[in-house]
Image (spheres, grey):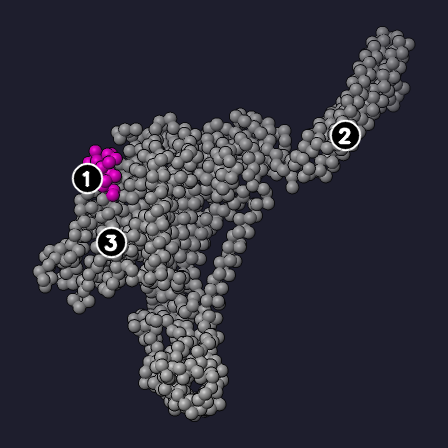
């Protein structure tokens, strides 16, 4: 959109520059035609905005069917229609202006000043009409956006009534084979996504690389937990049987001299705490248990624990973009692609 | 599948039938939990619950009357109770061995039996723990065994091997449960996703912790699984070693020997495999799981039993050698008179009255598994069913022999006694079968009894061709020969 | 299909926290509520005869050994037979209604069913005579009996409580002739010879000292 207006600005600037001298009829006509063209483009842009607003308003109505959303959606729809009509008008006028400018240029080339002046006038008039239509389109578009905002507000205030409100949560792409999944994963990895994941019914080897995952630190956690177990066994036995309350049996030592008798329990506690460390380490790193997750909204996803392979890219990713992400996933040829929405709240 | 089919572990292609898909595995395993229980299940379940009731009644009677209702006496302070304890603990060893040690050795065939065996470990250790808990005499004071503040305001004595046993068995139970449950999480998620009713979905869903097969989770999960295997391996070797310390650190002839730890561990694995196989054969027939547990699996398990049976036989022989070689008359007395039944006669000219238990042990444990040298026996279902039952009986007798024939006639003829089991001894032992079988049958009915995710990972097409892997592996890639690679990493 | 509401995501964590707190609480509760100092101390059983130690041992100043006559010679501090009561009460308050069970016992020969207040576990072998011979006073374990209308358990009869004294008997020792004196306080001369007193008793700390 921004690029379009920039391009449109150029001829206008040029013509004003040329206009420093006495502008010829041909030049005036060309200028008018360019202006009309720009106005038509603006009108088209306004129409698009109005249409989008109308679509979103309709979406709001679909999710939260109520009087307010229905009215707002209707209003937006009407405004969008109006903007469309205006845009067509502007386009027609721009065509007329263009045509007149062409004729003026031809006449000027032939040296027919009067004809050129007449065409130039026509072009000016057409350009004015185009500008007006564009203004009207803009107004209609503003109206549509206004209506859409109303619909949005109505939707947000109506959460809990009827259908709950939803927002996009992630893209879910399904693949038939681990090979396809690995290839797709590499593409997603190379595109620089971070909040994304592969979902497989069993651990697929090679995906660590394909996803670009750093090695897990679980071993470190388990090791620390095991050492805590070892030390706590020594301290426990020493505290209970030596410091707090020495139990002397058969005249045997109670302190560190009793080391051999401490070994079995040192070993068992090391194992026990390593086990706990590993269990809680897995749960911590995997952020489980997490019984509710937007990905479960997809019914298709139930095959992820059977025989299908999935890639999910979350909306929260910095690089996430509705269109680009979709295009990226489409380029990996998934057997199914879905935008999964989650409830707001 | 015929017994002549190739075995992956021997460099051949596929452990499961050719063309098995991921969905086939899911279907085969989940179907058991989703369809109505077959008649065979009910035929096993109802008597099991009956036996469980018997166990509860026996425990109630025992707690009310005191441990005197057992046949234990002076000098047989330990008898059936500790025999059963050691026997059940031993049964449990196969589970950890299969899930941990075979995992570390990359024996992929374990995937068809590990879940099953792990469950048996958990249930067997539960059954085992009943006996020492009751044998304390006042089970409501059993919390004295743990290092928590108690009524006496005393701490446990950590120099006692019985205390080590408390730690070893409880650690074993805890780690086994965690290991089992961690392995179950992805499969519970499979059941969740297949469930039709919301209640069922919610129950499995709650247990599956919201598992979504995320590879970021698999990464930690696989490393965690490896760590569990790595810690369970020394643990399983330690548990029965510690159980053997209960005996070996004493000065009883017949107990006071250094061969006990390895001897106990070998025996535990031996008996554990036997019971896993006995139950596996039943379940396989009841639920029709011949494609998941093939004759190849059974063949491999039988080889394991043959190997551990020979180890146990070696230990028996060596005990006699040491009894003779040490020149210790009490040791010789226990082995030749109390156990073997000849060589030493008592003053009446009699053999030890329990000689038959020793011979029952030897014939079941050493002689019967020798049949497994023959491939025809190893692949014959009725033959292996009978032999595994013999092994279970023999391993029970092993513990009985060790405990009772050492205790009932030792140093002083003045403290000689004899042992006779009471009906409570027998009923309680049978009752723990009820507990075990009830839990076990509920397990096969409601929980995936095969590791679905792990089996899938062993299918030939389970992993993408690793062209991004090191190039030096390239020569090994002749399509299809790429069997399931090593798990983790 | 979403099967759990989002609010449930915190539940496992909360359950875990509750289990931890509950577990610690359980251990704490057992530690406190199931300890002898909570369960035994303060036990005040109602006796078949409203016998008052305060009156007999306190106001009248009778020696403990007048009734518990075997305490210096036997493992048990015997409950006096009905004869001992009747020795006085055949002439003192012979018609008192409160003494009716005693007279009945005297006539029928059936013992009075006194309720034991200080109960030891069966596997513990406690010997009164040994402790008295070593110079442990009645008051050390039984408290101020001479002030009790009804006998009340004063000390927790727990293993650790026994062993505390066995490890450091000094504070509970006294001259043998002061054993039944409820008000005896150590003087300077006694305290200065403490090492000697302690060396004399040598209480056992091994298992079979009390458990045989």
Give the crowd class for mark 1: few <14, some 14-19, many >=20 residues within 10 Å: some
Q: Quadrant of residue B155?
A: bottom left
**Is residue B208 or residue B345 the one in the foreground?**
B345
Spatial CA span between label 1 and label 2: 87 Å
Q: Reply above or below: B254 against C113.
A: above
Give the crowd class for mark 3: few <14, some 14-19, many >=20 residues within 10 Å: many
A92 vs B376, left or right, is right
User: Residue lying furthest right in this view?
Assistant: A114
* Cβ atoms at labels 1 and 2 below 8 Å apart: no
User: Residue at the location (41% across, 90% down)?
Assistant: C90
User: Residue at the location (53% across, 30% down)?
Assistant: A300
**Is residue A11 or residue B182 the one in the foreground?**
B182
Spatial CA span between label 3 and label 1: 23 Å
Q: Which residue is mark 3?
A: B399
Magenta segment: B371-389
Indicate the secondary structure of the residue bearing disc 2: helix
């Amino acid at each position: 959109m921004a690029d379009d207006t920039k391009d449109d600005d150029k001829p206008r600037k040029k013509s004003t520059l040329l206009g420093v001298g006495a502008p010829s009829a041909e030049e005036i006509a060309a200028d008018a035609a360019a202006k009309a063209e720009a106005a038509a483009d603006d009108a088209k842009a306004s129409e698009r905005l109005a249409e989008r607003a109308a679509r979103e308003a309709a979406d709001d109505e679909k999710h939260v069917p109520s009087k307010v959303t229905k009215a707002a959606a209707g209003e937006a729809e009407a405004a969008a229609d109006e903007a469309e009509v205006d845009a067509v008008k502007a386009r027609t006028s721009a065509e007329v202006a263009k045509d007149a400018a062409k004729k003026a240029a031809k006449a000027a080339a032939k040296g027919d000043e009067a004809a050129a002046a007449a065409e130039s006038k026509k072009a000016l008039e057409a350009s004015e009409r185009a500008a007006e239509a564009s203004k009207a389109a803009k107004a209609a578009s503003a109206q549509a956006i206004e209506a859409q905002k109303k619909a949005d507000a109505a939707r947000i205030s109506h959460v809990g009534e009827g259908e709950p409100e939803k927002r996009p949560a992630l893209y879910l792409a399904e693949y038939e084979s681990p090979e396809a999944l690995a290839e797709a994963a590499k593409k997603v990895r190379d595109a620089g996504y971070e909040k994304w994941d592969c979902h497989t019914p069993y651990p697929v080897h090679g995906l660590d690389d394909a996803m670009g995952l750093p090695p897990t630190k679980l071993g470190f956690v388990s090791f620390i937990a095991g050492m805590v177990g070892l030390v706590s066994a020594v301290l426990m036995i020493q505290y209970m049987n030596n410091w707090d309350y020495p139990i002397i049996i058969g005249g045997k030592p109670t302190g560190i001299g009793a080391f051999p008798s401490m070994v079995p329990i040192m070993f068992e506690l090391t194992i026990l705490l390593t086990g706990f460390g590993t269990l809680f380490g897995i749960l911590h790193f995997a952020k489980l248990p997490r019984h509710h997750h937007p990905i479960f909204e997809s019914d298709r996803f139930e095959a992820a624990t059977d025989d299908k392979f999935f890639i999910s890219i979350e909306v929260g990713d910095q690089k996430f973009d509705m269109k680009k992400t979709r295009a990226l996933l489409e380029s990996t040829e998934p057997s199914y692609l879905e935008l999964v929405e989650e409830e707001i709240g | 599948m015929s017994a002549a089919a190739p075995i992956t572990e021997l460099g051949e292609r596929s452990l499961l039938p050719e063309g098995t898909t991921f969905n086939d595995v899911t279907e085969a395993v989940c179907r058991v939990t989703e369809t109505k229980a077959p008649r065979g299940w009910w035929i096993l379940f109802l008597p099991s619950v009956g036996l469980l009731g018997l166990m509860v009644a026996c425990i109630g009677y025992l707690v009310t009357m005191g441990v005197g209702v057992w046949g234990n006496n002076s000098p047989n302070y330990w008898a059936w109770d500790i025999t059963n304890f050691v026997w059940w603990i031993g049964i449990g060893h196969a589970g950890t061995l299969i899930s941990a040690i075979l995992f570390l050795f990359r024996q992929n065939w374990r995937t068809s039996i590990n879940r099953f065996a792990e469950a048996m470990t958990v249930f067997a250790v539960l059954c085992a723990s009943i006996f020492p808990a009751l044998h304390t005499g006042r089970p409501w004071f059993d919390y004295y065994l743990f290092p928590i503040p108690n009524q006496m305001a005393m701490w446990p004595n950590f120099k006692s091997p019985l205390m080590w046993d408390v730690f070893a068995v409880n650690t074993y139970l805890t780690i086994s449960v965690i290991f089992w449950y961690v392995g179950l999480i992805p499969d519970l998620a499979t059941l969740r996703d297949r469930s039709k009713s919301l209640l069922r979905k919610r129950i499995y869903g709650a247990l599956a912790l919201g598992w979504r097969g995320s590879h970021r989770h698999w990464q930690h999960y696989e490393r965690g699984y490896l760590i569990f295997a790595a810690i369970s391996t020394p643990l399983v070797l330690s548990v029965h070693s510690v159980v053997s310390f209960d005996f070996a650190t004493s000065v009883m002839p017949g107990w006071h020997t250094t061969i006990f730890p390895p001897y106990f561990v070998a025996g535990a694995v031996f008996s554990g495999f036997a019971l896993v196989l006995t139950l596996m054969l039943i379940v396989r027939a009841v639920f029709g799981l011949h494609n998941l547990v093939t004759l190849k699996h059974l063949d491999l398990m039988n080889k394991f039993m043959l190997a551990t049976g020979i180890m146990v036989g070696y230990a028996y022989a060596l005990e006699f050698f040491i009894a003779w070689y040490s020149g210790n008359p009490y040791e010789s007395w226990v082995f030749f008179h109390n156990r073997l039944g000849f060589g030493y006669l008592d003053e009446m000219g009699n053999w030890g009255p329990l000689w038959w238990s020793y011979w029952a042990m030897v014939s079941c444990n050493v002689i019967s598994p020798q049949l497994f040298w023959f491939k025809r026996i190893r692949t014959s279902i009725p033959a292996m069913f009978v032999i595994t039952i013999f092994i279970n009986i023999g391993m029970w007798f092993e513990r009985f022999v060790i405990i009772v024939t050492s205790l009932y006639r030792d140093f002083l003829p003045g403290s000689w006694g004899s042992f006779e089991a009471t009906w409570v001894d027998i009923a309680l032992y049978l009752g723990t079968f009820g507990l075990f079988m009830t839990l076990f049958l509920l397990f096969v009915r409601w929980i995936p009894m095969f590791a679905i995710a792990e089996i899938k990972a062993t299918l030939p097409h389970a992993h993408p061709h690793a062209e991004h892997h090191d190039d030096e592996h390239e020569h090994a890639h002749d399509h299809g020969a790429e069997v399931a690679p090593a798990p983790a990493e | 299909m979403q099967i759990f509401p989002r609010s449930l995501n915190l539940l496992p964590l909360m359950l875990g926290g509750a289990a931890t707190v509950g577990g610690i609480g359980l251990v704490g509760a057992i530690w406190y509520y199931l300890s002898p100092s909570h369960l035994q101390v303060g036990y005040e059983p109602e006796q078949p005869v409203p016998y008052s130690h305060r009156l007999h041992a306190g106001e009248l100043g009778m020696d403990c050994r007048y009734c518990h006559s075997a305490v210096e010679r036997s493992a048990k501090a015997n409950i006096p037979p009905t004869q001992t009561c009747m020795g006085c009460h055949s002439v003192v308050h012979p018609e008192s209604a409160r003494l009716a069970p005693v007279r009945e016992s005297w006539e029928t020969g059936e013992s009075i069913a006194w309720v034991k207040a200080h109960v030891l576990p069966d596997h513990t072998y406690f010997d009164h005579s040994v402790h008295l011979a070593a110079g442990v006073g009645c008051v050390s374990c039984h408290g101020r009996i001479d002030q009790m209308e009804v006998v009340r358990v004063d000390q927790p009869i727990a293993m650790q409580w026994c062993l505390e004294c066995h490890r450091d008997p000094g504070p509970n020792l006294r001259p043998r002739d002061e054993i039944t004196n409820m008000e005896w306080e150590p003087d300077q001369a006694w305290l200065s010879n403490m090492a000697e007193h302690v060396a004399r008793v040598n209480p056992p700390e091994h298992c079979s000292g009390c458990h045989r």
